[in-house]
Amino acid sequence: MPPKVENIATLVAKRDIAIASLDELYEEFNILYQVEPELIALESVYKEIAIKFRSVKKQQSTIAERLIESGETESAEMSANKQIGDQVKSDYLKCSERFVVYQKKCNAEKKSSNDHAKLEAMTSAVTKMADVLSFQKNANHGLEKLTVPNWDGSRKNYATWKSEFNYWMGKYKQDKDEQLQRLRKALPKNSFWANQVRPCQTIDQAWKILDTEFGDQRKLMDGLLREITNLKPVKSDSTSLSRYAATILGFVNNMEQIGCAVTNAKEAPFVMSQLLSKLDAKDNIEFGREMHRIEKEENVLNLLDWLNSEASLRSRVRKDADYHDNSGEHRIPRKFDNRAINSETSDDDVCPLGCEAKHLLAACPKYQR
């Protein structure tokens, strides 16, 4: 029976467990080091650290080989695996250096001058290895390859972009300095706010500048309301009504994302007046009649339902009309919809399309076309 091949996710989980165990051994080593125990006690912990370190390095190497085999040499997982391996190696070298120094101290009176020279050489070698590792880490193209979402500079997308940015920084354990460098790269090039953030010395200073301007909910709400105000008038065809409904739904989602439910906000009456003003006058009247008939409030959610329903209805009527025109058959008037309560008309039943006859919109021949 062939051996079971573990997937990358399993190997990563095992590696992380081994690193956690290694961190506990480092903590135990540091506690013993502070109380200056017998050399044999510290040496025992150090040997366990060395065994665990080699196990982690082997797991890291196995993960890297699997990623290369799957063609993910430039992936975020490969970068994270390399970064974790470098950190583990750095911690191990620091621990080794401390152990060698302590060993030297304990054996100073027992060792010969020859042994003393060997320890000096070993300490120097370990120190040089740590310095080389640190230099290579800092010189490795400045930053490890990591996909970071870029911000387009718009106020509307700022909150979503900031949340995604912080998620990736936390997932790959980027320190404050690395976060600041990545934040500068994620801002729009040559923009005013990129120039304001560039001199910042800490990531907190950079966020404070951006949050002051783009984290202001009042400014964001005003910007979204201006978008609605600047919309062009909406035509009465099914496509225009459907697209208008999608535009309103996007507006509602953006408002709710910043904690302002449009239907409950103090701006709701103003928002409704702006939305209704973009409709054709006849559609505006028809919406009001429909809400009065079914005894519902004229609010944003009900307007969305009406727009989608009306777009679907007008699309079907248009298709039926095109079919009868092409086939040469006599056109059969569509049945009245629910808004035609009965066939009788009153003085108020004036056709909004300008017909001389008094009838509801659903019974209008022009509307049926």
Image: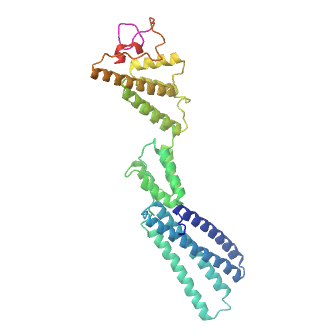
Q: Quadrant of residue 225?
A: top left
Depth check: give the residue in front, 192 or 363.
363
Q: What's the residue at 54%, 57% (across, down)?
A: 171
- Tell me the quarter of the image containing the N terminus: bottom right
- Compared with 239, 119 (above or below) is below
Q: Is residue 351 magenta?
A: yes
Percent x, y for residue 309? 45, 25
Going by the image, does 87 lie left or right of 368?
right
Q: What's the residue at 34%, 15% (across, down)?
A: 366
Percent x, y for residue 37? 72, 79
Depth check: give the residue in front, 59 or 29.
59
Depth check: give the residue in front, 205 or 48.
48
- Compared with 207, 5 (above or below) is below
- Tell me the quarter of the image containing the C terminus: top left
In this rendering, the count of numbered labels is 0
Q: Quadrant of residue 27?
A: bottom right
Looking at the magenta stretch, what is its main secondary structure?
loop
Going by the image, does 20 lie left or right of 80?
right
Region in magenta: 349-361
Q: How is the image coloured?
A: rainbow
Q: Is residue 365 visible?
A: yes
Q: Is residue 28 magenta?
A: no
Percent x, y for residue 354? 35, 11
Q: Is residue 213 visible?
A: no
Percent x, y for residue 362? 41, 15
Name the outermost residue toward the front: 1
Name the outermost residue toward the top: 347
